[in-house]
Each structure stands twice: as structure tokens, then as C-alpha cells.
Amino acid sequence: MISENLAAVTKRITIAAKKVNRDPGSVKLVCVTKGRTIEQIKVAASLGVSDIGENRVQEAVEKYNNLKPDTSNLKPKWHLIGHLQTNKAKDAVRIFDLIHSVDSFKLAQEIHKQAAKINKVQDVLIEVNISGEPTKFGVAPEKLMVLAKDMISLYNIKLSGLMAIAPVVENPQAARPYFVKLRELKEEINNSLLKAYSLKLMTLSMGMSQDYEVAIEEGATMVRIGTAIFEGVTK
Ligand SMILES: *Cc1c(COP(=O)(O)O)cnc(C)c1O
């Protein structure tokens, strides 16, 4: 079941990329395993899933410790896609290859501090609240530039891109403007900070089970997919 679903998702990623003349290899699939069992994760990893996304540090640490011996030959990369509290930054820095959810300078400073302690340069994305919904985390678009610029001084952090969650919509096409906006924000940052600071954002983490094809059409380089892999297509 997971293998069929995964094959179907991979195929749809390829089709969506080709539709807009993109190399399907430029889109990374992050398999979202929150709420899934260790066994399910092992199956996904054995089927070639190279990137795992979790949204809670505690749950991720437990799974990481449990899975390590079994997947040590597969070495999946770990992504934190959910909100991060400063008091969990230490654990997060220890296990995650990429933190998608930096949304304040205070949090960035703490990640920097914890990463410095273990001689790590932590790869991060800034989460942008692209829809302005009060229930969503993420920095407001108008505060993004200042945050990105401030983070340049934190040497144990590497800012490599942006992440956003589109609103829940009936028709995935309705999510398109939000993906366009995130891509434009990335271009804006590169236009103003590349020359002076050599900051170049490459990653756009956007698109989930409901809307990943539209996200890819608009430039997503990472899609975060859980339901479509573990439960199949829901529509
Ligand atoms: C759960 C989650 C996903 C995956 O959502 P699905 O609809 O299951 O594909 C992606 N991104 C974030 C931030 C999530 O919390």
C-alpha cells in the first residue's frame, strides 16, 4: 500500500515538474511521518524515502533514537516542519538536518547558540505566514526581509530558503497565489541581499498532499507529503 501510494506520488511529482519544463530531480520529496509508526517509517525508508518530516521535536527525537540502528545504512535526512519553541532548540539542532520553521530572530539566535556548542552549521528555512491567518505560525511577509538580513550575522546558521503552508482550500488551484507570493518573496530577498551579503536562497518548501502539484508548478523545491503516501489519494 505505501509502495503504491509512494509510486503514485512520485509519478505525479514528475508530471507536474515536466508540465512547467522543470527537472523532476529538482523537487525533493519530504515524507511527513508525524503520527505514523516506526514500522511505517521503516517501510518508507526501505522504499527509498531519503527525507523524513516531523512536526514535533519530542516525537521526532523518540523516533530518531528508535530508528537509528535500522536505518543507519539508509541514513534518512530529518526535517523539522512544525513550530519550534526556543526551549526545544537544543534537541532540534542535535537531530535535524533542516529546520523549516524559523519565524523570529529570538529563535534564530537560540538555534545559532546551540549549533555553535556542537560545532554545527544548522541549515534552516524561514517560515512565512503567507495567508495572514492568525492561527498560522510564521513571520509576516512585511517583516521577512529584516529577519533574513539579521540572520546573516549568525554564523552557525545557514539560511537556505523559505517555507509556507497554504490555506486549506477545496480546489488546489486556489492555493496557487500563495505559492506565487512565496516565490516572489524569495526573489525579492535574493535581489536585495545577494550582492551585498552573498545571501542566495535556493529552497522553497511548499506543497502538501492537497496541493503539491500546483506548488511544483510555481517553483517548489521541496514538497512535504504525508497523507497521500500513508493513506493514499483522498479524492
Ligand atoms: C502534516 C504536515 C504536512 C503534510 O500534510 P499532508 O496533508 O498529510 O500531506 C506538511 N507540512 C506541515 C507543516 C505539516 O504539519
Image (spheres, rainbow, N blue to C red):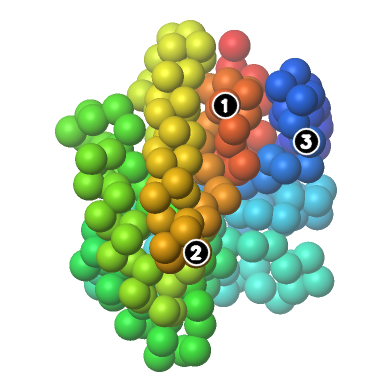
Residue 222 spot, x, y in % from top left: 60, 43
Mark closest to the chain's N terminus, 1 or 2: 2
Does the Cβ of the disc 1 residue fall within 8 Å of ligand 1? no
Q: Is residue 81 something that shows in the picture?
A: no
Asked if 190 appears above or below 226 in the picture, the reply is below
Q: Residue at x 32, y 61 (%)?
A: 149
- Seen at 42% across and 63% down, the residue is 196
Q: Quadrant of residue 164?
A: top left
To which residue does mark 3 refer? 24
Disc sitting over residue 198 in the figure: 2
Seen from the viewer's position, the closer of residues 160 and 164 is: 160
Residue at horizontal 72 percent and vertical 42 percent from the top: 26
Q: Which residue is mark 1?
A: 218
| Horizontal side, residue 28 vs residue 4: left or right | left
Q: Is 170 on the left or on the right of 6, as rendered?
A: left
Q: CA distance from mark 2 to mark 3?
A: 27 Å
**Residue 74 in the image: x percent, y percent?**
78, 65
Q: Secondary structure at mark 2?
A: loop
Look at 52% across and 43% down and name the residue there: 205
Mark 3 residue crowding within 10 angstroms, few (<14) / some (14–19) / many (20+): some
Q: Earlier in the sequence, mark 1 or mark 3?
A: 3
